[in-house]
Image (cartoon, rainbow, N blue to C red):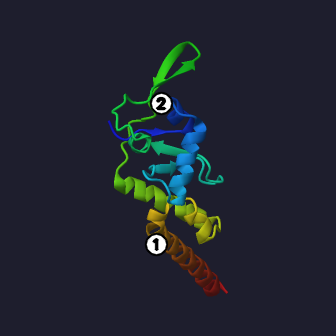
Amino acid sequence: MGPQWLTANQAAEWLGYSVHTIYRWIHETHGGTASEPLLLKPRSGNMGGRGKSWLIESQSLLMADGSGERRLPYVKEILDESRTALTTGNHGEEDTPSKVRADRKRWVEGWVAEGKPLDKVLAVFPPSLHGEIEVYYCQAVESGDDQKRHVQDGKAEKV
């Protein structure tokens, strides 16, 4: 089974901590002060949001918890009108390092397209990723500049 991604509420329920503790770990990860940083990714559909909704990889939660225990995957019962369904948060797709990097690049490209400054984009990621994010940011800015030049060149030819 591949990585399992949990919301802060699910993580708190799974580990038996308060949601406040989970958010403190997220804040420490972003600030670069966590002794065991969490592996985070923005929730899908939240790219245009304010960056406050995160998914946390379950094994990084176990490391932050310090228990080192192997736990059963998080399973939550959800009512589905006529029956009870189970969800594990794993939807059949396994994350790989290259998929995670591609997601980061896509998020940075989206934020550049929205006009977000570099410091705001970097604030979303832990300091250990800032070098990688700066590269994606510069590539996205250059790509946007190339597209603008291409559009301007096309208009100049029509005139």
**Which residue occupies 64% across, 82% down?**
155
Other residues around mark 2 within 10 Å, as few (<14) / some (14–19) / many (≥20): some
**Which residue occupies 49% across, 64% down?**
127
Name, please, the residue furthest toward the top. 82
Q: Mark 2 to mark 1: distance in Å?
A: 36 Å
**Which residue occupies 59% across, 84% down?**
153
The answer to whether marks 2 and 1 mark residues whose Cβ atoms lie closer than 8 Å is no
Task: Determine which quarter of the picture holds residue 90.
Answer: top left
Q: Dot 1 corresponds to which residue?
A: 135
Q: Amino acid at mark 2?
A: Trp
SS for dot 2? helix
Residue 125 visible in the displayed image: no
Which sits earlier in the primary sequence, circle 2 or circle 1? Answer: 2
**Which residue occupies 60% across, 49% down?**
46
Residue 14: mark? 2
Q: Eyeballing the image, is 12 above or below 48?
A: above
| Image position, residue 26 (x, y; %) | 54, 49
The C terminus is located in which quarter? bottom right
Q: Amino acid at mark 1?
A: Val
| Image position, residue 102 (x, y; %) | 42, 58
Other residues around mark 1 within 10 Å, as few (<14) / some (14–19) / many (≥20): few
Q: Nearer the viewer, residue 83 or 149?
A: 83
SS for dot 1? helix
Q: Nearer the viewer, residue 77 or 99?
A: 77
Q: Eyeballing the image, is 83 above or below 142?
A: above
Task: Report the label total.
Answer: 2
* Side of 1 where 42 appears, left or right: right
Q: Mark 2 or 1, which is nearer the eye? A: 2
